[in-house]
Amino acid sequence: MKVAILAANGQIARIVEQRILTEDQFKDVDLTLFLRKKDRLANLADNPRVTLIEGDLNNPADVAKAVAGQDMVFNAVIDHDDTGHNRPTKNIIAAMKENGVKRLILTNLLGIYDEVPGEFGKWNRDTCFGGKVRDDNAALLSDHLAEESGLDYTTLRLPWLNDRDEVKYRLTHRHDQFVGVSGSRQSIADVVLKIVADPTFGSKESLGIADPDTQGSARPVY
């Protein structure tokens, strides 16, 4: 299996990469790691299962080069392109269609559907969306683009993240109330790896993810 990880130097991406390259269940997975400066992952350059590609998600040709020949694409950075064009998401979708790649994992924000309740929900709206989730919000449009793409996609709507070692989370679906306010990067990586291990997991869904023990907190839990 061949998996491309875009924005491959991010913290969650690096957890995913480390686990794929060290855990026996993923021994047949090869990685194409796409990032702006590939020397940031120089420690992986000699690994026979790793290909490093330097590029920009806003450049269609760069994205197409990373996606070609893959079985799955994981975009490890949220599309905040506020130009009104959602260039990263559109470039990924176009490249996947051009190259016949079907399985896509995207990261996104909690609250894009105003699904976060209570005092924390208000704080999150104020902090992330200026008090109101607008229909032209880049993160929301990215999720709509994935849903309408015809690809076998999963969007992961991330909570406020922490660096706890614990893997603990609850998944919620597109029309569910979000449960929790925070979660560990290890937990997000674990969900990505569940999809790598079983591509039917989370198929054609926008999933919320957080540690349920943080439900009811008024602010992020670090």
Image (cartoon, rainbow, N blue to C red):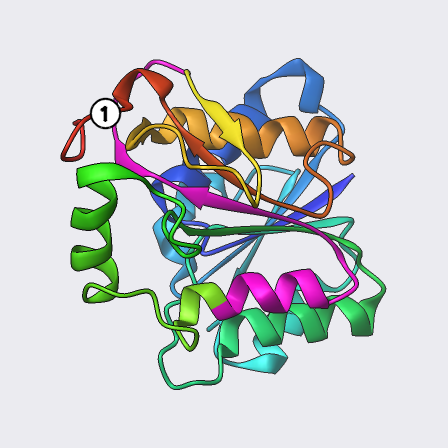
Residue 185 at what x, y percent from top left? 36, 31
The reply to whether the magenta stretch includes residue 95 is no
State the residue at coordinates (40%, 25%): 186
Q: Is residue 68 above or below residue 10?
A: below
State the residue at coordinates (74%, 44%): 2
Of helix, strand and loop, which one carries label 1? loop
Asked whether 185 or 214 is in front, the reply is 214
Residue 102 at what x, y percent from top left? 80, 55
Instruction: Quadrant for the C terminus, please.
Output: top left
Residue 51 at what x, y percent from top left? 61, 51
Query: Is residue 110 left or right of 70 when viewed as pictured?
Result: left
Residue 217 position by quadrant: top left
Residue 148 at what x, y percent from top left? 71, 67
Query: Is residue 176 left or right of 24 when viewed as pictured?
Result: left
* Magenta-highlighted residues: 141-167
Packing grade of label 1 (10 A; few <14, some 14-19, many >=20) is some
State the residue at coordinates (43%, 85%): 84
Q: What residue type is labelled 1?
A: Gly
The reply to whether the magenta stretch includes residue 153 is yes
Asked whether 30 or 7 is in front, the reply is 7
State the residue at coordinates (42%, 77%): 136
Q: Mark 1 points at which residue?
A: 216
State the residue lying farthest toward the front.
118
Query: Is residue 204 left or right of 193 when viewed as pictured?
Result: right
Query: Is residue 15 left or right of 201 when viewed as pictured?
Result: left
Asked whether 99 or 172 is in front, the reply is 172
